[in-house]
């Protein structure tokens, strides 16, 4: 039976049930929120506290000055110079376009530069300084500073920039800087690079990047929510890189470059007693300061499309047939194998014929009867054709490798090429064909497949000068309290070296020497001329050479030498691309270098 009392009791039960459910929901929500707060504040409180701190604190790097590069006498090759820059803070300038136009008479800002600055204004926050122009002259700085009150928001800032005070002197050796890329990051994993960082790209700048770079510092800045600096909290000063002193003699380097001026080629000068590089020239050159200033598209195109390859360091990357400079290697191999003696003589009629192929001597009428010394003095091809037949290519290859041919010198410069010393095994592996006897004859006069860099040639003649010791070419001076250690000793018999040296002395001082017109003024030197074919020579029916008129197909000219004969102090190689003849094009370069060096430093006592 329905009653009011029963209805009231049912309402109370239903209400109690709803309150329990509602209370449970509130309790569950509270527990969920509490758990989340516990997770955020207790479990991950430190992480979020750090994130908040990072929002408030900005670390700004302070770049370190790169170390200077000096020559062996302490003369500056590379330094850091002040770079005066004009910067503006857009939000303080009012009408920045009008400001730039008012500055134009003092800065000579081209219209495209103004447009570039205006575009940059749209990309960054208005309170951040914007660099308008760098490398301001002192006159421009004075003109701006004296009127700075009329240029609101503008200021002159001083940064440092790399400077090469000698311009293009030793450019390939010193190298240049550029913006970091993926290759740099992989090569220098210990450096914490950032986008836009500058790093050594070639030469000494690359080779000694870790030493020259120094250690950057930082500023710990307090910033607000939009990135404005409020105050500096902490500063760690940068540590500049140490100075790097090289073995290079900048005056000798400059003279060697003048000797090659207008030519395309290379010169390498070594101290034969320790492998120190005194000069390393590659021509034509470039100005590394241009990599700091920047190139226009036309300037860069002109540089990279130049057929004379000014960006290539030909001293280590140019590979050339060594021509007759290779004959001393053939001589030493034949003496070592007992195939010739000081009394061996061969007759040169101007050519030899093997397997229906004629191999010519450079002298059309021939040299007549010659021993080894005379064959080196007059650079007789036929003599060395005949010697190589008895010697064989593999014995020749062993001796050549003993003198450093066919492998890099280990100098440490990026991009060094190994050259090439052929052998039977090399040809079989490379081409799948057998070696032909005629190829041995061609190799014996430094033609065919054999290739060498100017640095390898300089290292070879240095070993002839010092008694057969191979030193790793180096740019770091040997400490005075230490003796240089050769990386390899060729074990060439002293009597064999003496015999070959007699021939090399006769090249410059003998009555029939191929370079007798270019012997040094003050010292007795020993050397060897060389001429290497670029294309196969054309001949008349009589065998006489037809002169090549196209300069691109003319022979390369080579010369290697050392001096003084009794107490060698300077060994060098010269390669003049398409120079024609070693005697007429390369030997004069060597003479000029020798005369300069011994006039400046005197003749060492024996």
Image (tube, helix red, strand yellow):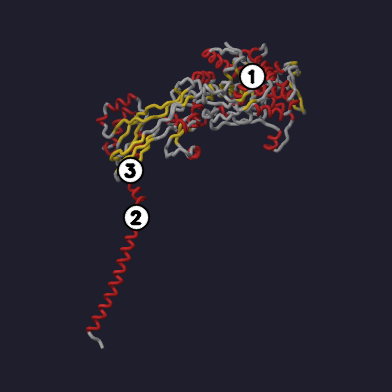
| 340 left or right, relative to 66 | right
Q: Are marks 3 and 2 in contact (CB under 8 Å)?
A: no
Residue 549 percent location from the top left of the image = 62, 22
The CA distance from mark 3 to mark 2 is: 22 Å
Residue visible at 54% across and 32% down? 414
Give coordinates of residue 98: x percent, y percent: 28, 35
Q: Is residue 557 visible?
A: no
The residue where tag 3 is placed is: 57
Q: Nearer the viewer, residue 459 or 19?
A: 19
Distance (Cα) linking label 2 and label 1 = 82 Å
Q: Which badge, 1 or 3, is on the more N-terminal residue?
A: 3
Q: Residue at x 32, y 37 (%)?
A: 129
Give 374 or 480, whichever is nearer the viewer.
480
Q: 20 and 92: which one is in front? A: 20
- The dot on residue 528 is 1
Looking at the figure, which quarter contains the N terminus? bottom left
Q: Which residue position holds label 2?
A: 40
Mark 1 against mark 3, which lies toward the viewer?
A: 3
Q: Which numbered mark, 3 or 2, is in the foreground of this view?
A: 2
544 up-or-down from 56: above or below: above
Q: Is residue 139 visible?
A: yes
In the drawing, does residue 519 fall left or right of residue 480?
A: right
Q: Quadrant of residue 228?
A: top left
Eye-nearest disc, 2 or 1:
2
Residue 289, given in percent of the width and then of the height, sits at 44, 27
Ranked by sequence position, the earlier of labels 3 and 2 is: 2
The residue depicted at 47 percent of the width and 33 percent of the height is 210
Name the residue furthest left.
4
Q: Secondary structure at mark 1?
A: strand
């Amino acid at each position: 039976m329905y009653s009011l009392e029963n209805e009231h009791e049912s309402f109370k039960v239903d209400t109690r049930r709803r309150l329990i459910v509602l209370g449970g929901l509130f309790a569950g929500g509270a527990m969920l929120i509490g758990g989340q707060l516990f997770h955020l504040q207790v479990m991950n409180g430190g992480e979020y506290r750090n994130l908040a701190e990072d929002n408030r604190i900005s670390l700004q790097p302070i770049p370190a000055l790169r170390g200077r590069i000096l020559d062996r006498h302490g003369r500056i090759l590379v330094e850091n110079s002040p770079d005066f820059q004009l910067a503006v803070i857009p939000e303080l300038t009012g009408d920045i376009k009008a400001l730039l136009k008012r500055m134009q008479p003092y800065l000579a800002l081209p219209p495209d530069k103004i447009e570039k600055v205006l575009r940059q204004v749209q990309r960054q926050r208005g309170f951040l300084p914007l660099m308008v122009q760098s490398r301001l002259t002192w006159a421009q700085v004075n003109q701006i500073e004296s009127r700075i009150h009329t240029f609101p928001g503008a200021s002159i800032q001083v940064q440092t920039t790399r400077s090469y005070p000698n311009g293009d002197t030793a450019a390939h050796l010193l190298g240049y800087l550029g913006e970091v890329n993926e290759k740099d990051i992989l090569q220098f994993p210990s450096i914490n690079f950032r986008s836009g960082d500058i790093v050594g790209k070639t030469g000494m700048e690359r080779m000694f990047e870790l030493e020259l770079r120094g250690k950057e510092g930082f500023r710990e800045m307090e910033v607000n929510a939009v990135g404005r600096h409020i105050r500096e909290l902490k500063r760690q000063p940068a540590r500049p890189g140490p100075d790097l002193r090289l073995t290079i003699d900048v005056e000798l380097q400059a003279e060697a470059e003048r000797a090659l001026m207008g030519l395309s080629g290379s010169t390498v000068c070594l101290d034969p007693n320790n492998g120190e590089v005194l000069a390393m020239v590659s021509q034509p050159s470039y100005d590394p300061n241009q990599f700091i200033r920047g190139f226009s598209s036309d300037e860069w195109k002109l540089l990279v499309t130049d057929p004379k390859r000014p960006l290539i360091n030909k001293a280590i990357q140019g590979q050339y047939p060594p021509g007759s400079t290779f004959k001393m290697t053939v001589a030493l191999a034949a003496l070592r194998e007992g195939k010739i003696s000081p009394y061996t003589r061969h007759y040169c009629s101007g050519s030899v014929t093997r397997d229906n192929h004629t191999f010519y001597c450079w002298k059309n009428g021939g040299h007549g009867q010659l021993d080894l010394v005379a064959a080196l003095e007059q650079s007789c091809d036929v003599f060395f054709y005949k010697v190589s037949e008895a010697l064989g290519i593999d014995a020749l290859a062993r001796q050549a490798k003993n003198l450093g041919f066919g492998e890099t010198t280990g100098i440490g410069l990026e991009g060094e090429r190994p050259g090439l010393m052929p052998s039977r095994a090399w040809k079989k592996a490379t081409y799948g064909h057998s070696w032909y006897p005629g190829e041995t004859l061609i190799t014996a006069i430094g033609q065919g497949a054999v290739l060498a860099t100017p640095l390898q040639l300089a290292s070879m003649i240095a070993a002839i000068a010092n008694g057969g010791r191979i030193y790793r070419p180096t740019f770091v001076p040997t400490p005075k309290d230490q003796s240089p250690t050769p990386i390899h000793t060729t074990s060439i018999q002293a009597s064999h070296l003496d015999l070959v040296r007699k021939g090399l002395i006769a090249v410059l001082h003998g009555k029939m020497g191929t370079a007798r017109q270019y012997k040094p003024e003050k010292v007795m030197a020993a050397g060897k001329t060389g001429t290497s074919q670029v294309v196969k020579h054309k001949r008349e029916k009589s065998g006489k050479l037809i002169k090549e008129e196209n300069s691109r197909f003319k022979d390369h000219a080579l010369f290697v030498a050392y001096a003084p004969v009794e107490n060698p102090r300077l060994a060098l190689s010269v390669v003049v691309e398409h120079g024609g003849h070693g005697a007429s094009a390369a030997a004069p370069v060597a003479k000029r270098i020798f005369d300069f060096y011994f006039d400046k430093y005197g003749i060492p006592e024996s």
